[in-house]
Image: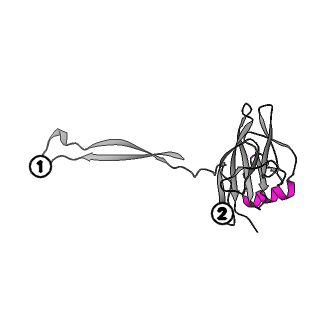
Amino acid sequence: MTGVLTFLVGFIGLPAAGVNSPAANVETATATVTATVTTTAPAPPEASDAPSSTSGSPAVRWTGPLLVSGDFNLDSVPPQGAMPTDGDIELSQINDGQEAVLRSARANLAVVPRGENPDAARCTVLAQTQGRRLADLPVAVGGKLCLITSEGHPSLVTVTAVHPEAQNASLDVHIWQKTD
């Protein structure tokens, strides 16, 4: 909010004591002072790429980028490549150079609705109620999946880049401690 305040300040010119001159007339000088006051309203909370958290959220087990080209075990710290069909998530192919096709033989993968940034509790609910196992899920850059690892860790996977020439994909992975 911006406003302008205007003040009129007057000065009365008085002759020096004992001086009787024509310049001893009373004069008034007027000055205009302008002050600009600016206040800033608090900005509305912006959407963030970091998962939202609540006071009851479990601690973060591991978070960071991964470059995947096959199966990946998300229960190890840091996550690492696994033997075929032993991982929690697998890059099965790249569709038209635009989407990473992800699947899992061990975990239910659930697509996160666009614009949502789930915490551990929400990822758990999505994986349990909407998750699919052994289904190819094409995920474009910016798309997210929730899953619960084979050892019970809620996880959020975001596709950050697809590399068709190398047949791999860059993921941002957020893994929480187990919830009982």
Tag of residue 59: 2
Left or right: residue 45 compared with residue 21: right
Give the residues drawn in magenta, as a range.
Answer: 115-134
As measured in the structure, the alpha-carbon distance from the residue carrying label 1 to the one carrying label 2 is 86 Å
- The tally of labels here is 2
Tell which of 62 and 28 is nearer to you: 62
Report x, y in % for residue 82.
Answer: 75, 50
Tell which of 179 and 113 is nearer to you: 179
- Tag 1, which secondary structure? loop
Q: Nearer the viewer, mark 1 or mark 2?
A: 2
Left or right: residue 49 compared with residue 152: left
Q: Is residue 116 shown to the viewer in this render?
A: no
Q: Residue at 79% across / 46% down in the picture? A: 90
Q: Are marks 1 and 2 in contact (CB under 8 Å)?
A: no
- Tag 2, which secondary structure? loop
Q: Hey, what amino acid is under mark 2?
A: Ala
Characterize the local packing of mark 1: few (<14), some (14-19) or many (20 or more) Cα atoms within 10 angstroms: few
Residue projecting furthest to the bottom: 180
Q: Hey, what amino acid is under mark 1?
A: Gly
